[in-house]
């Protein structure tokens, strides 16, 4: 399955979700490759190098920019999971990757600026859908406050439902574990924060459910 992770706004946590999902599927026994598609950012490549230096199970990371459709389809023949970390903007990488995508996973923070930028992706999704009719799109609310009384999740979901059919039911919260594990070449699944680990496991499960992955 080809999962493209992107938004046209930077700073939404694309790379963090990408590497954590990669480890989640690796731990479940699947073969995984990450495509780092941002020509000017090396977050995932650096994470992969740090991971190798820490003697953790390696995850192949490929730097690929420009037109991605055929490269992703080729990788899809070799790996069970292909994860694409897009640039934080509308780009040739985004347009071409979506032509091959099984799922466009859109992380959005629950701020108004992020919600507006995410909603503005809807015309791109619609345009790509004319050429890739099988592509599904799902929004995940990311970096949600851990404050118990916050209404951000409900408010963000209500706003985003106006533009997208699928808002994944389980948000990912803003936890220190995500930042610290990224800098160590790890996933939260390899750390002590069980709440963070559970959120990634739920996200991976919800993605598989959305794609009917592994169903008969």
Image (tube, helix red, strand yellow):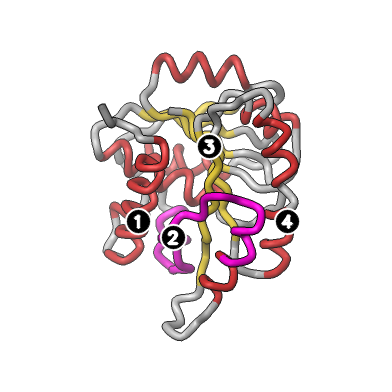
Q: Which residue is mark 3?
A: 136
Chain part drawn in magenta? 158-182
Looking at the rendered structure, which numbered label has been put on residue 178? Answer: 2
Is tag 2's residue or tag 4's residue first in the polypeptide sequence? 4
Of callouts 4 and 1, the N-terminal one: 4
Residue at point 67% right, 41% down? Answer: 87
Q: Looking at the image, is mark 3 or mark 1 nearer the viewer? A: 3
Give the structural element (helix, strand or loop) at label 1. helix
Q: Does 105 appear in magenta?
A: no
- Rendered location of residue 7, percent (x, y): 65, 48
> Tags 3 and 1 in contact by the CB under 8 Å rule?
no
Report the residue at 51% width, 69% height from top: 144
Kindly report the distance in space between the C-alpha atoms of the residues bearing marks 4 and 1: 28 Å
Instruction: Please tell me which of labels 3 and 2 falls first in the chain.
Output: 3
Q: What element does badge 2 sit on?
A: helix
Q: CA distance from mark 3 to mark 4?
A: 19 Å
Q: Residues within 10 Å of mark 2 (few under 14, many from 20)?
A: many
Identify the residue under disc 1.
Answer: 188
Q: CA distance from mark 2 to mark 4?
A: 23 Å
Up-down relation of residue 203 to residue 115 (above or below): above
Which residue is more in the foreground, 114 or 137?
137
Badge 2 vs badge 4, beta-carbon distance below 8 Å = no
For disc 4, the marked residue is 117
Q: Nearer the viewer, residue 194 or 151?
A: 151
* Residue 35 on image: x %, y %: 53, 30
């Amino acid at each position: 399955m080809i999962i493209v992770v992107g938004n046209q706004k930077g700073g939404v946590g694309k790379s963090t979700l990408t590497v954590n999902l990669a480890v989640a599927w690796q731990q479940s026994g699947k073969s995984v490759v990450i495509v780092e598609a941002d020509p000017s950012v090396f977050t995932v490549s650096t994470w992969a190098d740090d991971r190798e230096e820490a003697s953790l199970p390696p995850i192949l990371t490929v730097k690929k920019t420009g037109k991605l459709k055929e490269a992703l389809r080729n990788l899809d023949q070799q790996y069970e999971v292909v994860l694409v970390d897009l640039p934080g903007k509308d780009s040739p990488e985004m347009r071409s990757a979506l032509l091959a995508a099984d799922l466009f996973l859109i992380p959005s923070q629950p701020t108004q600026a992020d919600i507006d930028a995410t909603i503005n992706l809807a015309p791109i999704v619609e345009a790509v859908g004319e050429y890739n009719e099988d592509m599904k799109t799902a929004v995940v609310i990311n970096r949600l406050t851990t404050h118990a009384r916050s209404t951000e999740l409900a408010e963000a979901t209500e706003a985003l439902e106006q533009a997208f059919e699928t808002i994944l039911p389980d948000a990912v919260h803003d936890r220190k574990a995500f930042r610290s594990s990224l800098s160590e070449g790890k996933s939260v699944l390899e750390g002590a924060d069980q709440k963070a680990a559970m959120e990634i496991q739920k996200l991976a499960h919800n993605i598989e459910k959305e794609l009917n992955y592994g169903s008969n």
